[in-house]
Amino acid sequence: MTHKLRLSPDTSWLGACCTLWWNDDFLLMDAGISFEQAIDEMALAGFRGCSVGHKYPTDPGILQAALKLRDLRVSEPWVSTYFTIAEMKQQTLDTVRQQLDFMDAVEAGWSDPRRADLVVAEFGQAVNPLPVALFANAPRFDDEQWNRLCDGLDEIGLMAHERGRKLCYHPHLGTGVMTGDAVDRLMAGTDPALVHLLLDTAHLAVARTDPLAVTQRHAARIKHLHLKNMRAGPVDALHAQNQSFQQGVENGIFTVPGDPEGAIEVFPEIIDTLAEAGFAGWIMVEAEQDPRHTVPLHYAKMAREYFRTLVGW
């Protein structure tokens, strides 16, 4: 049954993150799926956009041609920021500039409203890449670090704005911004015109934060979505057994919307709330699953059908 929503496919575009086909954090979590196979399957499943992963061509012209052939666009390049640790600000600014230059080159000559957003997360002191207990060791920023982070995000937000792009901050497990309280502080400390929020439903939910409540508090700032579900059993084990992020991913904490095993049930309410706030932009389905034990195309089609039944397109 179609839910009562006002999102339009002319202004909201559905894509798939390439982390459904391989893992960009843990490179050995790989089933040998090529870039070409991944984007073929994205298009076959009915998506219109994709994130950028480590298997993508680094030549902008080659990437543009491959995506145009399949009527796909890039939804986001990723930048890990390091504003909260010493002597890393300039490197962060340089990386942001490089990614903006790359996307300008990829999109050169396109007359298409589907433009990529710049997606970032602060990885200073982050433990998600490490083989350590995730929640016990995640960083907690002091006031000075919060000020450096917020000031830095405003600076790169202006850089993105001057290129006609939105900077969207991604709360991420294992970092200093992964809970509702941290999201609230980040939103309060940054310029609403320059720093927007990427809502990743499962990263919040796994951190025991209600993604619907975050949506309701910050709907006007949310400009990009990662719709991802979680499995309750593996998430409980992640907490109870002090597992690392990699252990959690390998054990199946994440899945796609539409999976009967998923524990998040508020996707319709989240989309309703954003529709009422006038949301327009990328809606990305994602599941950081191990492709050696799952079939990415199966889950991609599952997620695409779920969204079709939800909104009617």
Image: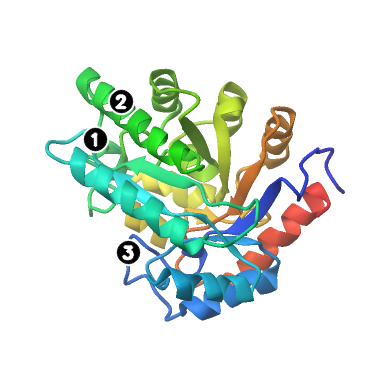
Q: Who's the residue at 33% across and 60% down the image?
A: 25
Give the residue at mark 2: 151
For the residues labelled 2 and 1, say whether their Cβ atoms are less than 8 Å apart: yes
Q: Secondary structure at mark 2?
A: helix
The residue where tag 3 is placed is 26
Q: Nearer the viewer, mark 2 or mark 3?
A: 2
| Disc 1 residue type (three-letter) | Phe
Residue 303 drawn above or below residue 143:
below
Residue at far right of view: 1
**CA distance separating discs 2 and 1:** 9 Å
Residue 134 placement, left or right of 299: left
Chain-order first, disc 1 or disc 3: 3
- First in sequence: mark 2 or mark 3? 3
Query: Residue 250's image quarter?
Result: bottom left
Q: Above or below — where is 108 with respect to 209?
A: below
Q: Position of residue 209 (x, y in %)?
A: 49, 31
Task: Give the residue pinned by disc 1.
Answer: 83
Q: CA distance from mark 2 to mark 3?
A: 30 Å
Q: Mark 1: which secondary structure?
A: loop
Residue found at x 45% / y 57%: 103
Amino acid marked by disc 3: Phe
Rounded to the nearest whole Å, what is the CA distance between mark 1 and mark 3? 23 Å
